[in-house]
Structure formats: C-alpha cells, structure tokens
Image (cartoon, rainbow, N blue to C red):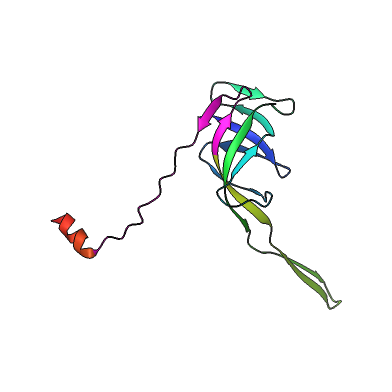
Amino acid sequence: MSYAIIKTGGKQYKVKAGEILKVEKLQELKSSSIVNFKEVLAYGDDNNIEVGTPLISGAKVEANLIKNSKNRTVLIFKKRRRKNSRRKNGHRQQYSLIRVNKIFSKDGKLLSEAEKMIEPNKTKVSKKQIQQKKL
C-alpha cells in the first residue's frame, strides 16, 4: 500500500489513497473541488521509500474537498483567586475535510489511486415490492 507524507497548514500528514483527512482550512473552495498538494516530503510503500531534501519536486497528491467547517468549541477560562477576576473565552478552529484520491511520483507516474465511491440508490421502494421480493 503506497503512502505519502505531505505538508499543509504548517503540519505534516501521512496519507494513503482513499483516506479521509481533517486538515487546517484550505482557501475558499467549493465542496467536491480538486485540491493538489505539491509539498510532498516523502512517498513509498512497504518495500522502498523516496525521501526529499526537503521536498520532492514533481511529486503531488490529488484530493477532493468534502467540506469546510468548524470544530467543536474550545473554552478558555481564566480565574484569579480571591480577586473576583475571571475571563471566559471560546474558540472554534476552522478545518477542511478532504479525501485523498491519487498519489503521483516525481516522474508523474501514478503510485496509488482510491477506489471510486459508489452512491447508494436513492430510489424509493414500497412495502408491496419488498413483500413480492420475499415471496
């Protein structure tokens, strides 16, 4: 199974094709748009690995943006005892949810690709049709 180590939002992530990942918020993109990560630090599989110095030029990771959203609220509460002084603050960090589709090597060769997502059938089936299938 091939993997890559990418850098985005000041953090490094080890990604595999088909994996869903929560990263720091990307620029204002519409959902289901394609995002390319060109800051690839390393890629490889179980047998061999290619490491950059610090980046591998030409290598990239292609992903779909699922949604931009906010995390749960983190409360910051500061209290100074016996001073009747307190302060309550909250913060919701923004993030982007992505699904990694393809990993490309420095030659542009495809290393791994995610399986296609199958949409569930949205057709309505009546109770009568279900009973007929059972018989």
- Residue 16 against residue 25 in the figure, above or below: above
**Residue 23 at x, y percent in the picture:** 64, 47
**Residue 85 at x, y percent in the picture:** 84, 75
Query: Taking 128 as reference, is 11 left or right?
Result: right
Query: Taking 111 as reference, is 50 left or right?
Result: right
Task: Give the prevailing secondary structure in the magenta stretch.
Answer: loop
Name which residue lies at 53% across and 41% down: 19
Residue 124 shown in magenta:
yes
Instruction: Indicate the quadrant where residue 100 lies.
Output: top right
**Front residue (pair 105, 122):** 122
**Residue 73 at x, y percent in the picture:** 66, 64
Name which residue lies at 16% across and 56% down: 134
**Residue 25 at x, y percent in the picture:** 67, 51
Name which residue lies at 40% across and 45% down: 118
Name which residue lies at 31% across and 60% down: 124
Instruction: Indicate the quadrant where residue 51 lies.
Output: top right
Count of numbered badges drawn on the protein: 0
- Residue 91 against residue 68 in the figure, above or below: below
Query: Taking 90 as reference, is 114 left or right?
Result: left
**Front residue (pair 125, 89):** 125
User: Residue reaching furthest bottom?
Assistant: 84
- Residue 95 against residue 35 in the figure, above or below: below
Residue 35 shown in magenta:
no
Residues rendered magenta in the picture: 101-126
Query: Taking 110 as reference, is 96 left or right?
Result: right
User: Residue reaching furthest left?
Assistant: 135
**Front residue (pair 130, 87):** 130
For the C terminus, the quadrant is bottom left
